Amino acid sequence: MKKQTVLVLTSILAVMTFAISGFVYEQSQVRKKGQLANTKTTELERMHAPVYGPADAKVTIVEFFDPSCETCRAFYPAVKELVNTNGGKVKLVIRYGDCQASCRLGKGFMRPVLLSQIAVGMA
């Protein structure tokens, strides 16, 4: 009987420890996302970078764009439409990024940067 009680109590303790650890980890991740969303976008903006949309927009999308890249040119209208449909809440900052090598390889390294900015800004 004592072995069974010890086993049950140990199991309950292990489950409770796991649940508390999961809760603490989740809260730390939420806090990190909040801090990331509140960081200033001026680190990614440059004075010479073209800006489309209102300067005081709540959400800033920074697109690293290579005008000679077919993938970037094809993706730009979708991003511009996103800015247009959100009526002054979103601004688009365009930065030059040489993505020819990655786009030829089919990796498209610029898209995850943009999509992560959208996700952080819209959250």
Image (spheres, rainbow, N blue to C red):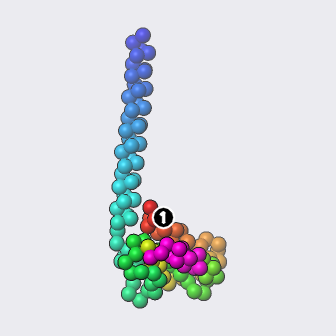
Which of these two is toward me, 32 or 13?
32
Residue 33: x, y in percent?
39, 59
Residue 33 in view (yes/no): yes
Q: Position of residue 29 (x, y in %)?
A: 39, 53
**x and y, in percent, of residue 42 in the image:** 36, 77
| Left or right for 79, reference 31 | right
User: Which residue shows up at 47% across the image and 69% down it?
Assistant: 117
Q: Is residue 95 left or right of residue 108?
A: left
Tell me the SS state at disc 1: helix
In which image quadrant can residue 80 be found? Answer: bottom right
Q: Position of residue 77 (x, y in %)?
A: 59, 79
> Which residue sits at x=55%, y=71%?
111
| Image side of residue 13 versus residue 117, left or right | left
Residue 92 is covered by the magenta coloring = no
What is the crowding at mark 1: few (fewer than 14 residues within 10 Å), some, or many (at least 20)?
few
State the extent of the magenta-drawn residues as a range. 76-88
**Considering only vertical position in the picture, is 5 above or below 109?**
above
Reading the image, the residue beneath label 1 is: 119
Which secondary structure class fits the magenta region best?
A: helix
Would you say residue 77 sits in the magenta stretch?
Answer: yes
Task: Tell me which amino acid carries mark 1.
Answer: Ala
Quarter the C terminus occupies: bottom left
Residue drawn at x 48%, y 68% as measured from the top left: 118
Q: Residue furthest top?
A: 1
Q: Residue at x 36, y 45 (%)?
A: 24
Quadrant of the rendering where the N terminus is positioned? top left
Residue 113 appears in the picture as rendered: no
